[in-house]
Image (tube, rainbow, N blue to C red):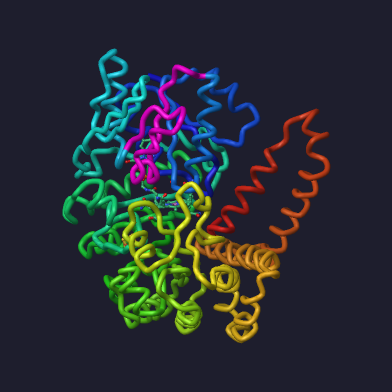
Amino acid sequence: MKVLFLNEYLPQEMLGMMWLSRAIKDAGHECKALFIPDKAWLDKIVEMAPDVICYSVTTGMHLYFADINQKVKQVCPDALSIFGGPHPTFSPEYVETDGIDAVCRGEGEFAMVELLNKMQAGEDYYETPNFWFKKPDGEIVRNCQSPLVQNLDELGFPDRSIIYDAGQIYRDSDRKVFVTQRGCPMNCSFCFHHAWKKKVYGAKNKEYTRKRSVSHVIAEINDVRSKYPLKFVHFLDDIFNLRKDWLEEFCERYPKEVGLPFDVILMANMTTEKHIKMLASAGCVYARIAFEAASDYVRNAVFRKNTTRKQLTDAAEWIRKYGIRLGSLNMLGGPGGTIEDEWDTVRLNIECKVDHPLVSIMQPYPEFDIQDMTTDMGYAVAGYDDFPQKFNRTSSIEFENKREIENLHKWFPIVVRFPWLMPVAKKAAQWNSMSKVYLIMYMLWSEYMVAEQARLYSRAQGLSGPRYWPIVDFTRRLATKGVLRVYETFFARYINRFFAPKNVALSLQMGDERVIAHMD
Ligand code: B12
Ligand code: SF4
């Protein structure tokens, strides 16, 4: 069978799609990807003539992709359209949307292979586990979940060629993403894990939290390095220090067998000074700790983070002590907090001297416990169809000082670096008419933090000199963006008639996305 994954360009390559492609190809089917925007996207789809078109969607993007699918259905009416990822997993009734034939709930590797094999053999596939189908007469078939894959090594290496062949921008990047585990034992109310674990799978922590072997991870990194540019390893794992024995083996072997700089996310209540020391000597140059909120009530009673303030400050202190760049993950707009609580989170970041604070605004996604808490506390939550596509600009909860919190969000990383601005920022956050100005400030500062981050990568590779100074890099980035924007606004439409230069609009959009995600 011919399978096509259609997605938009995201700031980094998508591991879910790569793992699905590995399983699909290993089972003898074809699998390709296409990223939009692409001027000839519909022609390319017609040329590929896929039997199955796949989409991976988060809440907020679901309507956009349902529209895209309608256009695809007009040119490929016989292709089966399947949606997977967080939105269909938690809102499977999405299958009722016009044009959608099936949704996959949870992990898709084995389910996809079973479905494709049945399609190939001309068998009835409506009872394939993990899927909800919409039959041609409109009847919905709801299947059960098959157990979670337990040995992650059996899945093989994610098939990177599916993404790197379709998106040069991902292939060329020196920084590539890797993941060493699936699942999480914690039950934070704002995160998808508790819902995936209990509501979708009814699983226990033991079955849900799985780790690849160190050998498998190291072999994958070396395999990628032999085929593609790779100078920095970005571990996506939610909690890199989840298992002490695993961490020790990794830190012992990685410098000898790989030796590339890397970054991680750590869980404060599992972090010891010994972990940080081991990570630093293994080549970790950047570590993020999830603070989320300084208020004990918001952090532990509402967000269910299960961390003490001391655990946060200790972990931050050790990270700095061993010369690792310190990042923090923070979340504003949680229900039950006050505006002073939000400023206290800024203060916590100042106290810990965080180099790189990442801040988002809480969204109560479908089936997450925070959804019920928010509504129980009497706040109105926007319907899923009105959720923003991104969680770093605005909130979908209606509360009294919503605009002030959205403004505070833009000031947050700036005040952490320049604490003397706090009194000004506190006043300024109340002026809603200035929100566009704050957004520009935020984007500029984020671009600067990305330049600092880039210096970290270049340093780790032994590159030095004025070219790599953040201020020089920042100026170069801004100047390039400025020139490209002028080109795109005034000249692109004439010049593009004669030859096809690189997709400038796309590079700009990707650049902005990466800045918002504070990465490059
Ligand atoms: C890395 C990451 C990103 C990366 C890359 C995203 C990507 N699509 O790969 C970036 C930085 C771009 C990103 C952006 C966003 N993300 Co994000 N992200 C993650 C993160 C941490 C890991 C994703 C991952 O690689 N998982 C590992 C792979 C193996 O699993 P997977 O992607 O889920 O895929 C499996 C299944 O879902 C399924 N599947 C997935 N797609 C399909 C398709 C088909 C056809 C089938 C059959 C099966 C299937 O099979 C896969 C293999 O088993 C997750 C949390 C997590 N730990 O999963 C959040 C998460 C997915 N992100 C989330 C959100 C909210 C966002 C943003 C909206 C944030 C923002 N910027 O405002 C954007 C949306 C971008 C987008 N359109 O996807 C939420 C989604 C919540 C929801 N209900 O929608 C999550 C769950 C985190 C959370 N809040 O709990 N994200
Ligand atoms: S510790 Fe992190 S990954 Fe785990 S449930 Fe909490 S927020 Fe999600």
In the rendered view, does 63 fall on the left or right side of 367? right
The vertical placement of 28 against 353, above or below, is above
Residue span colored magenta: 76-104
The vertical placement of 79 against 14, above or below, is above
Q: x, y percentage for residue 512?
A: 62, 54
Q: x, y percentage for residue 114?
A: 26, 26
Asked which quadrant contains residue 265, the reply is bottom left
The vertical placement of 323 against 60, above or below, is below
**Front-most of 139 and 232?**
139
Q: x, y percentage for residue 455?
A: 58, 64
Q: x, y percentage for residue 379?
A: 43, 65
Residue 278 seen anywhere in this rendered image of the structure:
no
Asked which quadrant contains residue 500, the reply is top right
**Front-most of 427 and 217?**
427
In the rendered view, does 391 fall on the left or right side of 250? right
> At 43% across and 54% down in the image, what residue appears?
233
Ligand number 2: quarter of image:
bottom left
Asked which quadrant contains residue 251, the reply is bottom left
Q: Residue furthest top?
A: 122
